[in-house]
Image: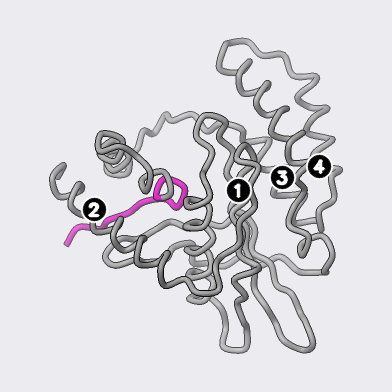
Amino acid sequence: MNEFLISLNQFADFTKATERGKARIVEQQLNPNPFKIIWYQLTKARIKKSIQHQGDLTPIYEALETLKNRTPTNPRQVSDKRISVEALNKFVKMKSPKVFRKNPYSIVTPPVKTTRVGDVIIRVAPDVVVKFEVDGKVFLGAIKIHVSKNKPFDYSQSLMISTILYKYLNEIKKEDEFVDPNLCFSLDIFGDRIVSAPANIDVALSEAERNCEEIKAIWGDIV
């Protein structure tokens, strides 16, 4: 049996793509480009670090200074620098979710990075997973960061991201841990959007399952 694989952000892209776009996304999963350029690495790393440190903005300001002193040598680097600066400044105004800034937590590094919807394995790979202790109970939370000026996620895509995060955390948690949907966030910088999972994830999961069936069908056509 084929292993159907897709990353979480690509899955969110798939839910709103055209027919041609959906085929292109599945093709990319089947034949990943080993030379694909990873954009905004510094930006995502410093936003992640800021969240890990209780919303401390020092890593953001340090990144802005680094970018200020960086001299691009080609058009791609010029674009990366310009959009990275814009993204970092937007994050400063957005900040991380209030619960992450007002309550102490520890960072968790789960060994499992995936979940399964139907026959499709989704690489969730949350950017930050945290553990809160409240009244003697342990709660898990997570954030997935999205930085794309050309393709920001809309509300439904962000809701899909946070729903999958919630599902994932419930699968990797220990028996004495709890998962609150209000602690599962999609953070979209250029969408100016921070969306938590719904209390009832059934509707979003049904939509996810429908899209996974479509991914399988396209996958089978390509293979």
Asked if the magenta segment contains residue 33, the reply would be: no
Q: Residue at x 47, y 47 (%)?
A: 9
Q: Nearer the viewer, mark 1 or mark 2?
A: 2
SS class, disc 1: strand
Are discs 3 and 1 less than 8 Å apart at CB?
yes
Whole-Å distance between the Cαs marked 4 and 1? 16 Å
Q: Position of residue 178 (x, y in %)?
A: 62, 82
Label 4 crowd bin: few (<14), some (14–19), many (20+), radius 10 Å: many
User: Circle 3 sits on which residue?
Assistant: 47
Span highlighted in magenta in the image: 1-11
Instruction: Say which quarter of the image contains residue 221.
Output: top left
Which of disc 2 and disc 1 is earlier in sequence? 1
User: Circle 2 sits on which residue?
Assistant: 214
SS class, disc 2: helix
Whole-Å distance between the Cαs marked 3 and 4? 7 Å
Kind of residue at badge 3: Ile
Whole-Å distance between the Cαs marked 2 and 3? 33 Å
Left-right relation of 101 to 110: right
Which of disc 1 and disc 4 is earlier in sequence? 4
User: Circle 4 sits on which residue?
Assistant: 59
Rendered position, 106 above or below 219: below
Rendered position, 198 above or below 23: below
Q: Quadrant of the N terminus?
A: bottom left
Which of disc 1 and disc 3 is earlier in sequence? 3
Instruction: Say which quarter of the image contains residue 173.
Output: bottom right
Q: Position of residue 199 (x, y in %)?
A: 55, 73
Which of disc 2 and disc 4 is earlier in sequence? 4
SS class, disc 4: helix
User: Which label was assigned to residue 145?
Assistant: 1
Label 2 crowd bin: few (<14), some (14–19), many (20+), radius 10 Å: some
